[in-house]
Amino acid sequence: MDQDQLAEMIRRRLKLDDQDWTIIKETPKFQRLFKNAVEASKYRLVAEVIDSKGCHSGHIGGQKLIFDNSGNLLTKESPDRVCSFLMPNLTVLINAFFENMMNGRDPNEVMFNTTGCFDTGPQCGGWGHVVVKMTAISKP
């Protein structure tokens, strides 16, 4: 797939009319995105659980949440239960990886690629805590 085919696929997915699409197509940041998106499409983002204590959703060490390069959770490749309290912090990491890919940089240049859920654990009035580390991997 080339850059123009990808741009057209994005246009169809977003269901944009001609006026909105013209604005996007002529915007330099989106031209850069289209240029780099083909290479970015070769990646998946993996959030691996590296520590889990008292997780009500059952997340355990070694478990992986798999996202496509646009940040969509691939539900068939991820655990049946994914805690919603983990997702907001993962969204921040997904955005950092996405920014690198769409700017033509190595997505794994994200320096702070580890985060956790909002639950603070029993020591701070919560009930558990989960820590994940995100990396970008080449698609199989």
Image (cartoon, rainbow, N blue to C red):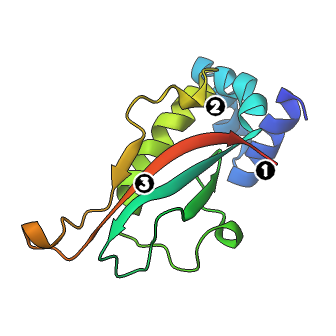
Look at the numbered disc 2 and give the secondary structure of its residue: helix
Label 3: element kind: strand
Residue 26 at least partly seen: no
Q: Earlier in the sequence, mark 1 or mark 3?
A: 1
State how many labels appear.
3
Residue 24 numbered tag: 2
Disc 3 target residue: 132
Residue 117 position, x and y percent, is: 31, 62
**Between 15 and 108, which is closer to the camera in this rendering?**
108
Q: Amino acid at mark 2?
A: Ile
Is the N terminus in the top left, top right, bottom left or bottom right quadrant?
top right
Name which residue type carries label 1: Arg
Residue 5 percent across, percent down from the top left: 88, 36
Is the Cβ of the residue at disc 1 closer than 8 Å to that at disc 2?
A: no
Q: Is residue 21 visible?
A: yes
Q: Are there few (<14), some (14-19), or many (20+) residues within 10 Å of tag 3?
A: many
Q: Quadrant of residue 40?
A: top right
CA distance separating discs 1 and 2? 13 Å
Q: Please tell me which residue lies in front, 5 or 86.
A: 86
The kind of residue on which mark 3 rests is: Val
Which residue was labeled with disc 1?
A: 12
User: What residue is drawn where x is 35% and y is 49%?
Assistant: 115
Q: With 56 as the anchor, is 33 left or right in this view?
A: right
- Tell us which disc is closer to us: 1 or 3: 3
Mark 3 or mark 2: whose residue is earlier in sequence = 2
